[in-house]
């Protein structure tokens, strides 16, 4: 399986955990909105991103949603107003 594009959003109840989850997500993708990231990931990277985020979360209070948007080359976004940059479909070295 190659790289796929994922939309990842979270709702974290406590400010310190929110900052920690945000830091994790910044290492895997590009921020589109306050708690919304677009990430081009391999299966392994997705597993690591999810595990790192879950390790920072309190699962009885916080939530994270991962939406698989398919192949990184598909154009699935329409912007109204100021356009946010999307990641290129190249490999991202962290």
Image (spheres, rainbow, N blue to C red):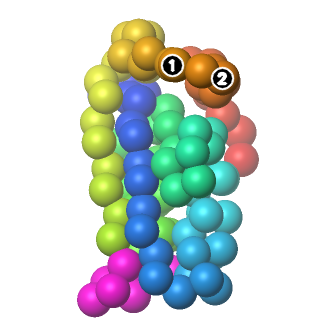
The residue indicated by pointer 2 is 82
Task: Report the number of numbered marks.
Answer: 2
The N terminus - image quarter: top left
**Residue 5 marker:** none
- Marks 2/1 in contact by CB < 8 Å: the verdict is yes
Question: Is any part of residue 60 visible from this angle?
Answer: yes
Q: Secondary structure at mark 2?
A: loop
Query: Is 2 within the magenta?
Result: no
* Residue name at image x 37 percent, y 16 percent: 76
Q: Position of residue 88 (x, y in %)?
A: 62, 19
**At which x and y percent is residue 57?**
44, 81
Using the image, determine if residue 68 lies above or below residue 51: above
Comparing 26 with 94, the one in front is: 26
Q: In the image, is 24 to the left or to the right of 52?
A: right
The residue that mark 1 highlights is 79
* Quarter-of-image position of residue 11: bottom left
Q: Residue at x 64, y 85 (%)?
A: 16
Write down the quadrant of residue 81 in the picture: top right
Q: Main secondary structure of the magenta part?
A: loop
The magenta-colored residue range is 56-62
Q: Determine whether the residue tagged by mark 1 lies in a helix, strand or loop.
A: loop
Residue 61 in magenta?
yes
């Amino acid at each position: 399986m190659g790289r796929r594009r994922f939309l990842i959003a979270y709702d974290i109840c406590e400010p310190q955990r929110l900052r920690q989850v945000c830091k994790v997500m910044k290492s895997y993708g590009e921020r589109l909105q306050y708690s919304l990231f677009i990430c081009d990931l391999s299966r392994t990277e997705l597993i690591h991103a999810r595990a790192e985020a879950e390790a920072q979360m309190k699962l009885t209070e916080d939530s994270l949603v991962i939406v698989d948007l398919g192949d990184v080359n598909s154009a699935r976004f329409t912007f109204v107003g100021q356009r946010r940059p999307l990641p290129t479909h190249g490999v991202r070295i962290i």
